[in-house]
Amino acid sequence: MVDYDTAVAAVQDPNADPILLAKIAYENPEFGANVAVNPRCYPGLKRWIAEFGDDRARETLAQYGFTAEAFGGPVQDQKATAQAAQQPAAKQAQQPAAQAAFEEPVATNPYGFTAEQALTTTDQMQIAQIAQYAPELRACIARNPNTYPALIEWLGQLGDPAINAALASRQ
């Protein structure tokens, strides 16, 4: 758990680690508004705070025009979303086995990043931006052979089953 003094220092630090900010918002809801206005607070975290944060945090984000509804609606359970997006069995049988193992995510980020970009770009800065601003495309980044080692290592630490499967397919 993040102690109070560390949390206070992090939310005031314009270069704070975005992952630490997410941990603070999750473990200490009273810091939600402070996390939301930190320049290192990424859109996915703002969306989470807009839906699950306390009243003060939601009001703060609303003042900036950022609500959960404005960016794709409420956060949904990945399992339910995946089941709704599954193709009929006949179509899946027609796909090559390698493609059937991965379903392409629907890009919901407001920046216009696509699954195709995440899978094929060679621009390291763009790969980093997609990882930061389009968390729904991180599994695609994990499959991109041009993704740099430090990002691969970070993705592996997230504990996301889809990302872990994509990382396993690289080896």
Image: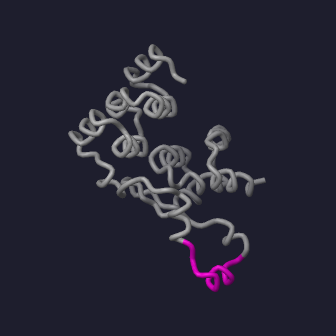
Which one is in front, 130 or 109?
Answer: 109
Residue plotted at (37% across, 27% down): 31
Q: In this view, does 64 lie to the left or right of 122?
A: left
Indicate whether residue 136 is drawn in magenta: no
Q: Where is residue 64 in the image (x, y as percent from the top left)?
A: 23, 40
Q: Position of residue 97 (x, y in %)?
A: 73, 74
Looking at this rendering, what residue extends furthest in the top direction?
A: 5
Quadrant in the rendering for residue 36: top left
Q: In this view, does 100 lie to the left or right of 49?
A: right
Q: Is residue 78 above or below residue 8?
A: below
Residue plotted at (50% across, 48% down): 126
The total number of labels drawn is 0
Residue plotted at (38% across, 53% down): 111
Which one is in front, 16 or 146?
Answer: 16
Which one is in front, 119 or 139?
Answer: 139
> Could you tell me which quadrant the N terminus lies in?
top right
Which one is in front, 119 or 27?
Answer: 27
Q: Position of residue 132 (x, y in %)?
A: 48, 43
Q: Which colour scheme is used?
A: one colour
Task: Specify start and end residues of the magenta stretch as a single range.
Answer: 86-96
Q: Is residue 114 left or right of residue 59?
A: right
Q: Is residue 155 above or below residue 119?
A: above
Residue plotted at (61% across, 83% down): 91
Looking at this rendering, what residue extends furthest in the right direction?
A: 171
Quadrant in the rendering for residue 88: bottom right
Quadrant in the rendering for residue 108: bottom left
